[in-house]
């Protein structure tokens, strides 16, 4: 029997709420409108930095489960069909309402949303899942200590390195998703989920306020 990991389900729900918050702050123009003299500036950026981990958490949840499961091509097919059906339905509504006109490009976007990068997350996730058999094989060949060193090296290379090729669209890229896969695999192999959460939550809030302080200092320097 397979036990459902409700803690991962809860983390996914929280991550989705954070993603909605990020979209409201950025796409809604809240961050651009707020000024240093406005108290809402500090609230908005605090919410931004609290929520900026959302995509990473969501991908790590998937990576945590993928690291133990076998690759199934049927899952990719089902995912593709779900996206195509939903996208085709939205396109039909747009055509009926007059928001879009029927063209070859709109049909291509409806039928091949992954290839056309209509939804960046699904395109990156699709690539991650295709590579998952290789990633799982690598993880299984490594000891926990070796996997830890791989994780530290990858994070250092992609987060701290000044090399041009490591600039992967602020983390919104399938290469970073692969890094997160190794992080999630290490969390599983090292059994970090069974440790007390209070310490990790403390680090989370500490780093959030560090980012907020750096952002405020940078804003004052730019005045």
Image (tube, rainbow, N blue to C red):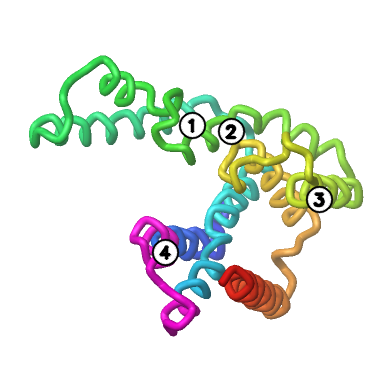
Q: Quadrant of residue 140?
A: top right
Report the disc number at residue 156: 3
User: Is residue 65 left or right of 80 when viewed as pictured?
Assistant: right
Instruction: Compare marks 4 and 3 and give the one earlier in the sequence.
Output: 4
Q: Which residue is mark 1?
A: 75
Q: Nearer the viewer, mark 1 or mark 3?
A: 3
Instruction: Compare marks 4 and 2 and give the one earlier in the sequence.
Output: 4
Q: Nearer the viewer, mark 4 or mark 3?
A: 4
Tell me where the magenta segment starts and ends, as one range.
22-43
Q: CA distance from mark 1 to mark 4?
A: 40 Å
Q: Which residue is mark 2?
A: 129
Q: Is residue 31 above or below residue 72?
A: below
Query: Counting other residues with Cα less than 10 Å from the Cα at mark 2, is it few (<14), some (14-19), or many (20 or more)?
Result: many
User: Is residue 4 left or right of 30 when viewed as pictured?
Assistant: right
| 190 is within the stretch colored magenta | no
Q: Which residue is mark 4?
A: 32
Q: CA distance from mark 3 to mark 2?
A: 24 Å
| Element class at badge 1 | helix
| Element class at badge 3 | helix
Report the disc number at residue 175: none
Query: Counting other residues with Cα less than 10 Å from the Cα at mark 4, is it few (<14), some (14-19), or many (20 or more)?
Result: few
| Element class at badge 4 | helix
Check whether the beta carbons of the residues at disc 2 and disc 1 lie within 8 A of each other: yes
Q: CA distance from mark 4 to mark 3?
A: 31 Å
Residue 213 percent coordinates (x, y): 64, 77
């Amino acid at each position: 029997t397979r036990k459902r990991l409700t803690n991962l389900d809860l983390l996914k729900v929280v991550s989705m709420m954070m993603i909605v918050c990020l979209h409201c702050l950025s796409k809604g123009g809240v961050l651009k409108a707020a000024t240093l003299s406005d108290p809402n500036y500090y609230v908005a950026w605090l919410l931004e930095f609290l929520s900026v981990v959302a995509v990473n958490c969501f991908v790590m949840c998937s990576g945590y489960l993928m690291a133990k499961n076998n690759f199934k091509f049927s899952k990719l097919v089902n995912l593709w069909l779900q996206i195509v059906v939903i996208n085709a339905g939205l396109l039909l509504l747009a055509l009926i309402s007059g928001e879009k006109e029927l063209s070859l490009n709109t049909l291509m976007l409806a039928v091949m949303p992954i290839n056309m990068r209509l939804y960046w997350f699904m395109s990156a996730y699709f690539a991650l899942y295709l590579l998952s058999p290789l990633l799982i094989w690598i993880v299984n060949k490594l000891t926990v200590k070796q996997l830890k060193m791989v994780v530290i090296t990858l994070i250092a290379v992609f987060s701290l390195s000044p090399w041009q090729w490591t600039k992967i669209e602020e983390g919104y890229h399938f290469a970073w998703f692969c890094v997160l896969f190794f992080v999630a695999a290490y969390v599983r192999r090292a059994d970090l989920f069974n440790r007390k959460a209070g310490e990790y939550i403390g680090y989370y809030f500490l780093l959030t306020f560090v980012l907020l302080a750096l952002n405020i200092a940078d804003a004052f320097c730019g005045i």
